[in-house]
Image (cartoon, helix red, strand yellow):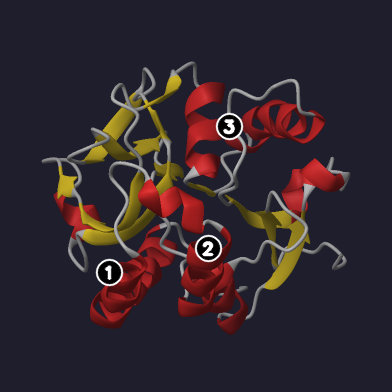
């Protein structure tokens, strides 16, 4: 783990081999130090959050409802401290669901057992129009969705899962989708998770690959815009 300083971004992942993908690449290119930790394999979470410029919580195969898992419990206890200090918080897929749960919202599977897997269109709300200028197509890989917490603003809707993104208190965002996705990640997920591609709502592997070729550049622009919106332009 990297030594903490004001130029550090805390990255929370959920498996030993998890990567921070394109979001990590962008943050590194801006000059930030990346402190990646995985509570689900025993990594401690920092006690002094004032040393961090932002916190990013990524996806994983577990559920935000798995509070009997020590790692998930640690994160559910940790996120309120981030919010209290108003440190920029990005919750991506499971990370967004964890934020929603901390804020009192329900996390649940699709009522018909559908999943979202592949590139799908999202629909910005009136409030969210300015947030999705660069792209309204994103990569999905999930079986649960979040309700919108009290006090949060819904930024985008979806066809299968109605709530796709919300912002809370101006400095915490939850997305149901994966803006961090890379081609290597798609290859790994569709290979190791091939059994999931037979479930209702999943797209065939070739659609995942084709979607990456078509949409990755606009998602890159969206991701850069998001970091800029949260003031993550590089260490000062």
- What crowding class fits label 1: few (fewer than 14 Cα within 10 Å), some (14-19), or many (20 or more)? some
Mark number for residue 78? none
Q: Which residue is mark 1?
A: 207
- What crowding class fits label 2: few (fewer than 14 Cα within 10 Å), some (14-19), or many (20 or more)? some
**Dot 3: element:** loop
Q: Is residue 2 above or below residue 200?
A: below
- The CA distance from mark 3 to mark 1 is 26 Å
Res 29 visible: yes
- Residue at x 44% of width, y 18% of height: 106
Q: Which residue is mark 2?
A: 189
In this picture, residue 136 sits left or right of residue 88: left
Q: Nearer the viewer, residue 24 or 200?
A: 200
Q: Quadrant of residue 174?
A: top left
Q: Quadrant of the C terminus?
A: bottom right
- Residue at x 30% of width, y 81% of height: 217
- Residue at x 33% of width, y 76% of height: 212
Q: Nearer the viewer, residue 160 or 31?
A: 160
Res 177 visible: no
Q: Quadrant of residue 158?
A: top left
- Residue at x 16% of width, y 47% of height: 124
Q: Earlier in the sequence, mark 3 or mark 1?
A: 3
Q: Which residue is mark 3?
A: 63
């Amino acid at each position: 783990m990297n030594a903490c300083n004001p130029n550090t971004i805390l990255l929370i992942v959920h498996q030993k081999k998890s990567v921070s993908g394109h979001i990590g690449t962008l943050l590194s290119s801006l000059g930030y130090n990346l402190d990646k930790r995985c509570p689900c394999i025993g990594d401690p979470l920092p006690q002094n959050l004032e040393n961090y410029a932002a916190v990013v919580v990524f996806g994983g195969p577990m559920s935000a409802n798995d509070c009997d898992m020590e790692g998930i419990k640690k994160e559910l206890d940790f996120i309120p401290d981030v919010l209290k200090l108003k440190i920029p918080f990005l919750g991506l897929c499971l990370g967004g669901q964890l934020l929603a749960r901390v804020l009192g919202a329900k996390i649940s599977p699709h009522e018909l057992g559908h999943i979202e897997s592949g590139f799908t269109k999202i629909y910005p709300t009136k409030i969210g129009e300015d947030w999705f200028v660069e792209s309204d197509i994103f990569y999905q890989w999930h079986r649960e969705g979040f309700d919108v917490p009290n006090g949060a603003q819904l930024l985008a809707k979806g066809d299968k899962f109605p709530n796709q993104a919300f912002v809370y208190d101006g400095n915490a965002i939850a997305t149901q989708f994966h803006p961090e996705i890379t081609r290597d990640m798609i290859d790994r997920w569709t290979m190791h998770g091939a059994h999931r591609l037979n479930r209702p709502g999943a797209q065939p592997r070739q659609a995942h690959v084709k979607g990456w070729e078509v949409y990755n550049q606009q998602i890159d622009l969206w991701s850069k815009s998001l970091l800029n919106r949260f003031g993550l332009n590089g260490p000062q």
